[in-house]
Image (tube, rainbow, N blue to C red):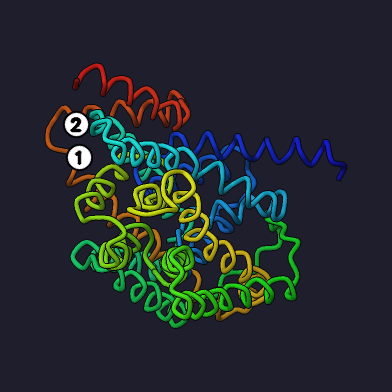
Amino acid sequence: MDYLSLTKKFFSLLFLFLRIGCTAFGGPPAHLGFFRNEFVVEKKWLSEQKFADLVAICQFLPGPTTTQLAMIIGFSRLRYLGSLAAWIGFSTPGSLALMLIAISLKEGNGFITINQLYGLSIVAIVIVSHAVLMMAKQSCTDFPSLVIMTLSTGLLIHLTETWMQLLVMISSGLLGYIFIQSPARITNDLFPLEITKKSGFILITLFIGLLFGLSILAHMTQYHDLLLINTFYRAGALVFGGGHAVIAFLNTTVVNYHWLDHQTFITGYATVQAMPGPLFSFAGFLGASMNQAPNGFPGGIICLISIFLPGFLIAIGILPFWTVIKDHQAVRSSLAGIHASVVGMLAATLYSHFYLNSVHGLIDLFWIIVTTIALLYLKIKPWMLVIISMILSLLLLR
């Protein structure tokens, strides 16, 4: 591939993920809905089965689930440059907004309020609902998988701890192995990956080496920049359960280290809920808010790279081994159970975090119906629905 073609493909991917990053409100479940619509339905880069496979992989790994999924999809199109384009595009809008807000707060220019964006939660409900239904149709095709999906949904509605999600996935894999007949091997794989086991081993070794090496160096030298990088790298490398779990982890570190005060942390946590893209972008707010240098944009960028890097290393590094492992019949049966549990997790999140918090009356239900008609029958793109709902919210609820 010549330089001009490479550059063109890089920026094409970058702008694609930038568009998604600008409109992907609603957290990880909504992000999966956006990704499925874009890469399974519209562009057909992934089959439904491959999409479910990749979601299962990323759910199992530590780090930012949907950003890792974006990086893997980018990697399939343009290898490492593709992963870079996917990460920059998907994470930049929210990260940049959060850093600007942090700098404004720090410089005393007044608190920047977040406008009422009520309609975004309605769009998220519709997008997640559609994704859950389509994924259930694909992944829950027999009685055992339907039972696993139902049990997963019920358990995760009532037991919301992060560790419970991992336990449900492991248990679902075991139930799939026992009760689900091994699906036939899929030969029309629509997701080519040019990565060798040697490359995967190097990436995983680097992931582990940085995890221990940064920790040793930081505690030996007590150099502030190293302590900062180590803290955010550990957050990205060791925390399962996505953005909300990593925020809890960071609260016990950056505040205890007196790098910033608790009120600033809480302000950032509230603000990130209204931002598009991954919740891990919260690292940009924290880095920009630090009491000592590096802070501002340099501090935000350092923290963002540190927290997202381990997720990239482990997600791409595991792929050459996963593509071999998943071809075994027992693994395919287990994966069928895990796919069903992922649908259950999304359904539980839809009910607990979206429906209960956003639907309070007939007007809300009417808005959901109108948005559903616009998505399914008028074929309006999800990103356009986000923009329309944002404008309507600002006009009607100001």
Q: Residue placed at 46% from the left, 43% from the top? A: 297
Q: What residue type is labelled 1?
A: Ser
| Viewer-nearest residue: 257 or 317 | 257
**Label 2's element?**
helix
In the rendering, at what x and y percent does residue 394 appear? 26, 21
Label 2: few (<14), some or many (≥20) within 10 Å?
A: some
Residue 159 occupies quadrant: bottom left
Q: Residue placed at 69% from the left, 58% from the top? A: 189
**Label 1's element?**
helix
Which mark is nearer the camera, 2 or 1?
A: 1
386 w.r.t. 213: above or below: above
Quarter of the N terminus within the rendering: top right
**Residue designated by label 1:** 358
Q: Residue placed at 52% from the left, 66% from the top? A: 57
Q: Residue furthest top?
A: 395
Q: Which residue lies furthest to the left in this view?
A: 361
Q: Earlier in the sequence, mark 2 or mark 1?
A: 1
Proximity of marks 2 and 1: CB atoms separated by less than 8 Å: yes
In the rendering, at what x and y percent does residue 12 appear? 67, 35
| Viewer-nearest residue: 225 or 358 | 225
In the rendering, at what x and y percent does residue 126 appear? 34, 38
Label 1: few (<14), some or many (≥20) within 10 Å?
A: some
Judged left or right of residue 254, residue 2 is right
Q: Residue 364 carries which label?
A: 2
Marks 2 and 1 sit apart, C-alpha to C-alpha, by 8 Å
Q: Can residue 397 be seen in this view?
A: yes
Q: What residue type is labelled 2?
A: Asp
